[in-house]
Image: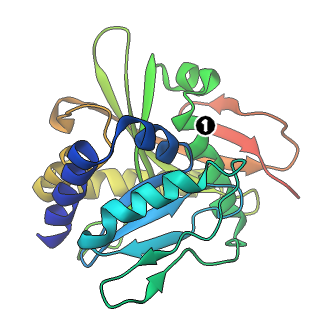
Amino acid sequence: MKVIENAKFAKRIWDEKIDKKAKEKFRKCFHLRPTTDYITIVSTHKEKYMNGLKVSKCNLEQGIVKCAEALCNEEKLNEVNIKLRNGNTKSFPTTKRSNKEYTIQAKFINEIVRQNVELKKAFDVVNLHLIGSEIILPGEEDKIDILAYGSTNKNKYKLFFIEVKEANGDKKEEAFKQVKRYMKTYIENENFIEFINNYPMLEENIDITKFEYEGWVVKGNTNETKIRYKDSHYIEVPQEV
């Protein structure tokens, strides 16, 4: 499957071609999303929430390095121009994505990357790591908003399927139905298992067949000022009016 081949390629570039400092900078506001035709560099920077820069395999290393360098300018994302073989350039879209759900998604991803203490407590893990966002296999309709994993103090691992909703979006009951459907679609799918085990930017080599699986819902709340664990596998986060 082409998407798995692209994931393995991106993982190899990340592991072997990108130095430690560039990785640390890139992780702060970017992650990779392999697809069938290209690899998307996804931004969670406040100026570019969930905007994506689609690059070919031959431009991936350059794209990662240039995005990492952009953060050196007072943490502000400048135009990242990636020169292609034909002499043209590619860059992130110049505007923010206005959908409030994207803002919640990006901010929540950033908190996962920052090892937010309250999140680790809610998920009952000692370490929490992002795998990716909007993950989907060809031929499937179900797209996972956020996929993450964590290790417990009992040396066990959990895989988290996370559905994100804005305050006025679907009710949490409907969101949980979606999560359960995603899990049923993917958990025993051999292509999905190979895809995730070879996903780029993982903190370590993993085998998700040995993980416990949990479905979670994250929903915006315009009256909240901090992340709050509200109910079993349910979190509410601040959302601007």
Q: Residue at x 21, y 44 (%)?
A: 16
Residue farthest to the top, as pictured? 154
Position of residue 46 in the picture relative to residue 163 (left or right): right
Q: Quadrant of residue 83?
A: bottom left
Against 15, residue 156 (above or below) is above
Residue farthest to the front, as pictured? 87
Q: Which amino acid type is marked by label 1?
A: Glu
- Counting labels gives 1
Give coordinates of residue 13: x percent, y percent: 23, 53
> For mark 1, what is the residue?
111
Against 50, residue 131 (above or below) is above
Q: Quadrant of residue 114?
A: top right
Give coordinates of residue 91: x percent, y percent: 53, 77
Q: Residue at x 67, y 49 (%)?
A: 219
Position of residue 82 in the picture relative to residue 85 (left or right): right
Quadrant where the C terminus lies? bottom right
Give coordinates of residue 150: x percent, y percent: 39, 27
Quadrant where the N terminus lies? bottom left
Q: Residue at x 32, y 65 (%)?
A: 60
Q: Element under label 1? A: helix
Q: Residues within 10 Å of mark 1 (few under 14, many from 20)?
A: some
Give coordinates of residue 21: x percent, y percent: 44, 37
Q: Residue at x 64, y 23 (%)?
A: 118
Q: Nearer the viewer, residue 173 or 22?
A: 22
